[in-house]
Amino acid sequence: MTGGAQIGLAVEEVGTVIGLADGIAWVQGLPTAEVGEVLLGADGSRAWVFQLDERLIGCILLEQSGQMAAGLRMRRSGRRLALSCSEALLGRVIDPLGRPLDGGPSVPAGTPWPMEARSPAIIERDFVSRPFYTGNTIIDTLLPIGRGQRELLIGDDGTGKSALALDAVLHQHDQGVRCVLVLIGQRRTQVAETVAVLRARGALAHTTVVVSEAGSLAGLQYLAPFAGCALAESWMHAGHDTLIVYDDLGKHAQAYRELSLLLRRPPGREAYPGDIFYLHSRLLERSTQLSAALGGGSMTALPIVPTQLGEVASYIPTNLISITDGQVYLSSKLFAAGMRPAIDIATSVSRIGGKAQHPAVARECRRLRLDYLQFLELELFTRFGTRLDADMAARVAHGHLLQALFSQGRLQPRPVGVQMAWLVALNEGWLAAAPVAQWPALLDRLAEAAGVAGAAPALEAARGAWVSAVRGWLA
């Protein structure tokens, strides 16, 4: 004993870096290292054990100093990779390791939450029974989403998938939902534009943005969705309702493919490793509605995946379609035709959201989908100059009214009260009775009146109260 300190011998495993390339380090030694463990370098660098071979360890570099080179000593930390989660992350822009990217002060330490965690067991989950409002008329009426659901946004590049997800984030400002926006492999200008929109619209206060830019290492792009999921999961287990947007998982799959090829894993279909399905399933299975015994929190997921030339049967999109609870398909043909948002209602589906839709909204739009799909078929005949009888002409006119109702600009989320007012006016026939040229003005009048705080009846109110209110707004 010297000065209260005990002097003795400590045995510690030490490994040696024998190769570096493209954010990957090969380490020799450390026979008891585990997959997912963090290794510490003598120069302060950090690496994450990603693959165990017979003689070597394949690691993803998390932090790399200028002294990082072959021959560097690495030792085990005994810790798994985790994100420090706290309330202080709201309103911040961070990288997958929790380091701030917005020029603000460092984030105070919070509760470490593992990036790789098991999904909640069946007994820990509850039914998806509460509506999640995105602010988009088509989704909230025809493709309803429940809190705890996983709804895929799919379509070609440039069809508005990211804009649709951004609208959903903006709409949560008064819904009591915390948002995590994960941006994977995007250019810095795109990231800056997204953050500027969130800040200008006051949505950054309830949002955390996790960014892994296009120029970052493939390892960080791989970790980005797991970091965002860890943050949303920590809030969910604290009893909060959360929304997480993965933009996009196509780039995430490409980053995983790059890492796997660098680590010499055998390639499979389209050179992706054989466990690419398991990669996304274990990520998305963590989104759920927790039982009341665990706080009743929820995590709603909106993963985004691009297609090429509308081919939804390609490898990664079909994987995600089978994992999620439905998909919203955005069509390049509808986009080119001027439909905004370019949602293909015939191809899109929400498998469980109907159970969570408010009964009043479900009552008003129960025939909406069928009427619109019939209109799309009838419209084909009108393009060839086919003469229609009075009944068919009325259906076509009703379909054009629905198109006007569904049309919605970017960054213009609509409260559910506004959508309810439009549906009541539609079903009462007041909109159809007006000339076509007056439809936009009537819809704007209803939106302005129903959007005033306290002006619209509650959704639980009797339908007669809604009819009286809408009649007064249109008078």
Image (cartoon, rainbow, N blue to C red):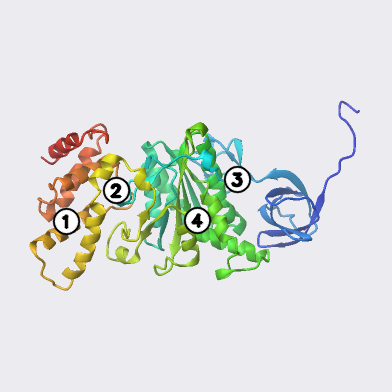
Numbered tag placed on residue 141 in the rendering: 2
The quarter of the displayed image where residue 414 is located: top left
- Which amino acid, by three-letter code, is at mark 4? Arg
Task: State which tag comes first along the sequence, 2 or 4.
Answer: 2
Q: Nearer the viewer, residue 360 or 468?
A: 360
Q: Residue furthest left?
A: 390
Q: CA distance from mark 1 to mark 2?
A: 17 Å
- Which amino acid, by three-letter code, is at mark 3? Ala
Q: CA distance from mark 3 to mark 4?
A: 30 Å
- Which amino acid, by three-letter code, is at mark 2? Thr
Q: Residue furthest bottom?
A: 384
Q: Are marks 3 and 4 in contact (CB under 8 Å)?
A: no
Q: How would you rate the neighbour count of disc 4 (Cα within 10 Å): few for under 14, some for 14-19, many for 20 or more?
A: some
Specify whether residue 133 is in view.
Answer: no
- Would you place residue 170 above or below residue 332 in this image? above
Residue picked out by circle 1: 398
Residue picked out by circle 3: 117
Circle 2: element type: helix
On the image, the x and y values in percent for residue 149 come to 43, 47
Mark nearest the camera among 1 and 4 is: 1
